[in-house]
Amino acid sequence: MDISKGYAFVGARYDDNENGEDAGAVYLFNPKGGSWRQAQKLIAYDGEAGDLFHVVAKAGRWLAVGAYRDDNDGVSRGSVYLYQWDGNEWTVRFKLFSLNGVMFGASVSMEANVLCIGDHQMSVDGVSTGEAFVYEFDGSTWHGTQKLTASDGEAGDEFGLATAVSRNMVIVGVRKEDEKGENAGAAYAYELTLAPRAIHVPLYYSTINEALSVAQAGDTVLVLPGTYSEFIAMKDGVILKSKSGPLRTIISGSGQPQLIKGARDAVIEGFTIAGNDNGDGAAGNGILSDGDNLTVRRCIIRDNRTGVYLNNNSQAVLVNNTIVDNAHSGIYMQIEPSPEIYNNIIADNGENGIFRNTGHSLGAPFVQYNCYFGNGTDFGYYGSAWTPDPGEGE
């Protein structure tokens, strides 16, 4: 069984259906009107009697179902079916199996685009110890990347009867491992070496925040066109990028301190970030960079109280953005910010194009090669007057 976002996925190992006796099935339930109601029933498209199709794991818009008695070449080797949510129902997309499998699919677990499949009867070097297999989705297909075995495995251990995936870690359960006593059991932890991933929204996860929750440094969260009403906290080293650019990909909201909060070595590219204007005297930033070195590029930042707020020694990089129509300031700087702000259009912001609070201790911002027009004032300040050193063409 798996539960995700209010839906329950329940395997029925011995379900009798059109595929035959004990073919197995998975029932999907969602809560409506205060009670759980069946939404869909899945059976294998090529299922047969005795397949035991029922072992489930879900991640985002992927659902894996193991059928560890499935016959692939006339021999009961097991298989795993991969379903994808199309917005209305779950549809099978792939089927995985091992030519040497014995009970392939006895356990399944997944997170983002990583899938682990256990076969606790698999032979390793001629000994039936069990094995686990790691698959990754590359944007078009699932492919095997690693095999996991116990370094001290013995016959009958049943390595792989249970698996779990979390970020770049896999835990594999061994039911009959004997180190602490006969059949006492054990769990083995493995750190995976994963290539940087592209985590697609809404293909893998329906929201940006869901995708960020599983992303790691080096990963890219790639967002398809649409309007996303979310308040986002970036993660260190993660790239948040739109697939089709800012005119078609919008992050919007209101009533929050900021729509997006930065992080170390993070990147935001190709979005419109708009609508967070909380009124006179209230916070309402499009983006907050607070002591980090966030990079923001090729974005349209508009209709917020302040477009970008740079605080506490922010070393943000703002390049090739259009920062317009924000009620107070396009960019607001205070408390030793040392950002790089260049090649931006900063226009039609109500009070200031760039506001610098020089009443606090000063940083060393690099502000050059920008285009300013239509602002209340291009360079506002509190404390000592300032203007940036003009860059060529500014």
Image (spheres, grey):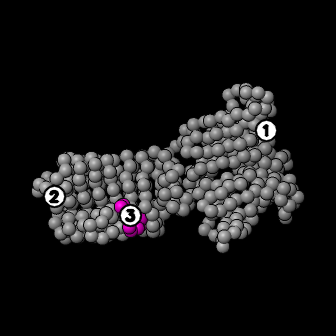
Tell me which label, 3 or 2, sits earlier in the chain: 3
Residue 47: % across, % down: 81, 58
Q: Is residue 308 left or right of residue 2?
A: left
Tell me which label, 1 or 2, sits earlier in the chain: 1
Q: Label 3, secondary structure: give it.
A: loop
Residue 204: % across, % down: 56, 58
Q: Label 1, secondary structure: give it.
A: loop
Residue closer to the observer: 94 or 386: 386
Residue 203: % across, % down: 56, 60
Which residue is under mark 1? 121
Q: Residue 333: in sight, yes or no?
A: yes
Which residue is under mark 2? 382
Residue 302 falls in image quadrant: bottom left
Residue 93: % across, % down: 67, 59
Q: Give the range drawn in magenta.
A: 250-258
Tell me which label, 1 or 3, sits earlier in the chain: 1
Residue closer to the observer: 119 or 139: 119
Q: Residues within 10 Å of mark 2 (few under 14, many from 20)?
A: few
Identity of the amino acid at label 1?
Answer: Gln
Query: The N terminus appears in which quarter of the rendering?
Result: bottom right
The dot on residue 256 is 3
* Residue drawn at point x = 24 percent, y = 64 percent: 329
Q: Residue furthest left?
A: 385
Identity of the amino acid at label 2?
Answer: Tyr
Q: Label 2, secondary structure: give it.
A: strand
Q: In this view, does 392 lie to the left or right of 53?
A: left
Numbered circles on residues, count: 3
* Residue drawn at point x = 16 percent, y = 66 percent: 377
Q: Does the magenta stretch include residue 367?
A: no
